[in-house]
Image (spheres, rainbow, N blue to C red):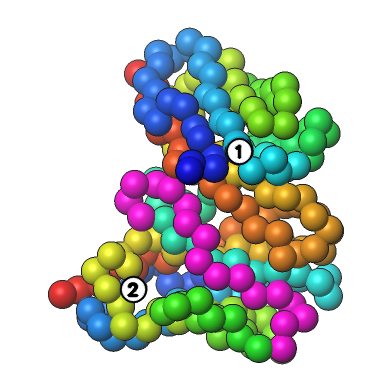
């Protein structure tokens, strides 16, 4: 089974609007971390936000927030007030317990329209 | 300020001609990773080191080798590049702590072209 699933290959959003990028995960380890990365066309992967499995509150970092629904095993990224510079690929990733391996989803390409 | 550095940023090689990509880090992290990423796809983990312990992915071709001579440096060697090896190669590091909070820090990548 896929560890990380991103079902939206591409998304469009109007500038200044909010957008939600979906991510579901599969693990039986009670301790895990969920990460979102942004990859602009230049290629560099930029860390955006982290959510731990034991965190009681949803993570927020500036315009990024994570809608963490543990029972549903989902960790959706919400970008508020979209900007043209947000146009990029977005990857959801997971790390389980004590292991150093990260599992990546297939990504969502976000296009912000002016 | 750069924390994970990859050289070169762009590499062109000929079919079958060995090539080495390099990665260095100033973070003193225990773990270093090499990923292959093809256009519009997820990064694919090739292998990673925890300190000197090498961890190969089961589906990484033998054509790909790696060396980590010290904490700061890690190399990716492609012994006989094929056309299918043209991709972006990403190096990343992490502390290697036993907590799932440990994130990865990526370098800017090396884009490999095989002629």
Judging by the rendered image, the residue that carries numbered circle 2 is: A11
| Circle 2 residues within 10 Å: few <14, some 14–19, many ≥20 | some
For mark 1, name the chain: B
Q: Is residue A66 above or below residue B106?
A: below
Q: Is residue B62 magenta?
A: no
Measuring from the top left, give residue A68's x and y in whole percent: 62, 84
Does mark 1 fall on the same chain as mark 2? Answer: no
Measuring from the top left, give residue B110's x and y in whole percent: 44, 33
For mark 2, name the chain: A
Q: Farthest residue toward the left? A: A114
Residue that appears at 33% across and 73% down: A11
Q: Is residue A48 magenta?
A: yes
Judging by the rendered image, the residue that carries numbered circle 1 is: B26
Q: Farthest residue toward the front? A: B1
Range of magenta residues: A40-56
| Circle 1 residues within 10 Å: few <14, some 14–19, many ≥20 | few
Query: What is the CA distance from the residue labelled 2 to the residue labelled 1?
Result: 36 Å
Residue that appears at 83% across and 34% down: B53
Horizontally, is B114 left or right of B52 in the view? left
Mark 2, secondary structure of its residue: strand
Measuring from the top left, give residue B5's x and y in whole percent: 51, 35
Horizontally, is B11 left or right of A13 in the view? right
Residue that appears at 70% across and 43% down: B29
Q: Is residue A32 above or below residue B74?
A: below
Q: Nearest the camera: B33 or B73?
A: B73
Eye-nearest disc, 2 or 1: 1
């Amino acid at each position: 089974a896929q560890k990380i699933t991103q079902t939206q290959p591409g998304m469009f959003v109007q500038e200044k609007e909010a957008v939600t990028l979906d991510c579901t995960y599969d693990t039986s380890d009670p301790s895990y971390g969920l990460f979102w990365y942004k990859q602009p066309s230049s290629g560099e992967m930029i860390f955006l936000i982290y959510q731990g499995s034991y965190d009681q509150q949803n993570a927020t970092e500036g315009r990024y927030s994570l809608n963490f629904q543990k029972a549903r095993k989902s960790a959706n990224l919400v970008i508020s007030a979209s900007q043209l510079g947000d146009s990029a690929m977005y990857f959801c990733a997971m790390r389980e317990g004590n292991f150093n391996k990260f599992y990546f989803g297939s990504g969502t390409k976000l296009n912000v329209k002016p | 300020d750069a924390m994970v550095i990859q050289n070169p940023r762009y590499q062109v090689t000929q079919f079958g001609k060995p090539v080495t990509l390099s990665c260095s880090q100033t973070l003193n992290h225990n773990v270093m990773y090499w990923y292959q990423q093809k256009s519009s796809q997820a990064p694919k983990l090739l292998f990673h080191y925890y300190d000197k312990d090498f961890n190969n992915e089961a589906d990484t071709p033998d054509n790909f080798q790696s060396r980590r001579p010290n904490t700061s440096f890690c190399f990716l060697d492609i012994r006989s590049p094929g056309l299918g090896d043209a991709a972006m190669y990403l190096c990343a590091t992490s502390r290697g702590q036993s907590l799932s909070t440990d994130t990865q820090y990526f370098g800017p990548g090396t884009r490999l072209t095989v002629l």
